[in-house]
Amino acid sequence: MAKLESVSPISDEDIMLLPVKDLATAIAYYESVLGFVTVTRNERSVSLRRDEAEIGLIVDGSHEPHKAESLAFLVDHLDALHKELTDRGTKPGAFDVQEWGGNQFRTFFVREDQDGYCYCFYHPV
């Protein structure tokens, strides 16, 4: 199984306060599709972890999915994660090579439909 080595915001979102419409639905997605486990949970929020990547979700009734931000996850084995996500019923995007800060990275993206987040999974070329 692929390991998530870190998570970073792509713009200015707080990775520990990602707004969601419904907490139970969001938790089910992150656990069953993305392989996260719940670390802490209360009525309005949850912390989730997979390997070295931790994110937080918070209920926000005014959240607008079409305005959701994006996160980037550094992955140790990109092909293995792509297959894992496909096997779990999601449709990861095609592989691509992108350049950030003078470095090249192999990438693919996954769109989370309920709350509108786009996740970039990457590994250095």
Image: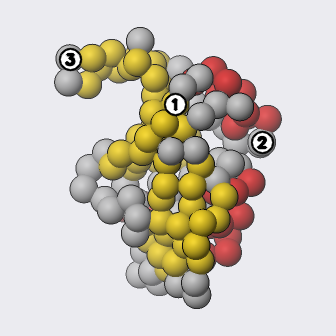
Element class at badge 3: loop
Quickly name the residue at label 3. Answer: 102
Q: Amino acid at mark 3?
A: Gly
Q: Position of residue 79 (x, y in %)?
A: 63, 20
- Per the model, the C-alpha gap separating discs 3 and 2 is 34 Å
| 92 vs 72, nearest the viewer | 72
- Which image quarter is the N terminus in? top right
Q: Residue at x 74, y 54 (%)?
A: 32
Element class at badge 2: loop
**Residue 94 visible (yes or no):** no
- Say if 63 sits above or below 100 in the image: below
Q: Earlier in the sequence, mark 3 or mark 2?
A: 2
- Per the model, the C-alpha gap separating discs 2 and 1 is 17 Å
Quickly name the residue at label 1. Answer: 75
Q: Residues within 10 Å of mark 3 (few under 14, many from 20)?
A: few
**Residue 104 visible (yes or no):** yes
Element class at badge 1: strand
- Say if 39 sits above or below 96 in the image: below
